[in-house]
Image (spheres, rainbow, N blue to C red):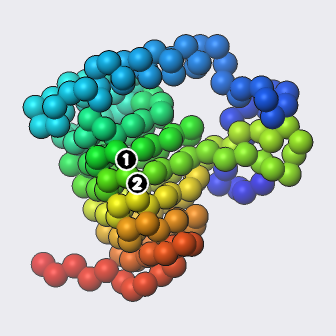
Amino acid sequence: MDDKLWYKTASQKDAYTTSWNLREVIYLHLWRITWTLFYRTTPKHFFNQWRLLLLKLFGAKISGQPFVFPSSKIFAPCLLTLCHKSCLGPHSEVYNLGPVILEERVTISQYSYLCNGTHDLSLENMPLMIGKMVIGNNVFIGAKSLLLPGIKIGRYAVVGAGAVVARNVDEYDIVAGNPATFIKRRIINK
């Protein structure tokens, strides 16, 4: 087992049994209904505060003024932290089975997918494994990128469009490809 991932629950009986308890299942269903009826149907510009309020009501930790597009999809708001000026772009998806933290001024571009869960395939019951995903200040995630469980992306890093990020990315690194590999250092002209 990867040391940055852990089992969601030790009591998962088999591969066909959920690792979520009844309270969590009810919460997730209520959120999906709320997202469908009151979140994704809102206009892009005028209802950002409304979408942030809905996320807060479902337990998201929000500081400052992040922006979330109405087509962005979040699995579990209670496991999401959005900091000032962070942005979840159009049709981006945060499949946060474990904690996901977007620090200040993070851009998650359109159709990107943040997946913070996997299964331990070495065990017959394939228990759900989750990690903590942290995306540092001023990070840019290119369109259609895939970020895998438990990674940390250092501040000012750039993930190129369509990249598959399975390992941590250092500060100021630019990565791209499948799997994402180092391209060069990001130089910020002031």
Expressed as whole percent of the image width and height from the top left, the position of residue 57 reads 34, 19
Q: Which mark is residue 112?
A: 2
Q: Is residue 79 left or right of residue 102?
A: right
Tell me if residue 107 can be seen.
yes
Compared to 167, does 76 lie above or below?
above
Q: Residue at x 69, y 35 (%)?
A: 8
Q: Residue at x 57, y 38 (%)?
A: 97
Q: Is residue 19 left or right of residue 86?
A: right
Tell me the crowding category of disc 1: few under 14, some 14 to 19, or many 20 or more residues within 10 angstroms, Cα based. many
Q: Quadrant of the N terminus?
A: bottom right
Expressed as whole percent of the image width and height from the top left, the position of residue 115 reads 53, 48
Residue located beneath label 1 in the image: 92
Compared to 85, does 70 lie above or below?
above
Answer with mark 2 or mark 1, whichever residue precedes in sequence: 1
Expressed as whole percent of the image width and height from the top left, the position of residue 3 reads 71, 56
Compared to 181, does 56 lie above or below?
above
Viewer-side residue, 168 vs 181? 181
Q: Is residue 189 left or right of residue 143?
A: left
Q: Residue furthest right?
A: 124
Q: Which mark is residue 5?
A: none
Kindly check if marks 2 and 1 are in contact, taking CB atoms under 8 A apart as contact. yes
Q: Amino acid at mark 2?
A: Ser
Viewer-side residue, 145 vs 183? 145
Q: Amino acid at mark 1?
A: Ser
Expressed as whole percent of the image width and height from the top left, the position of residue 21 reads 67, 18
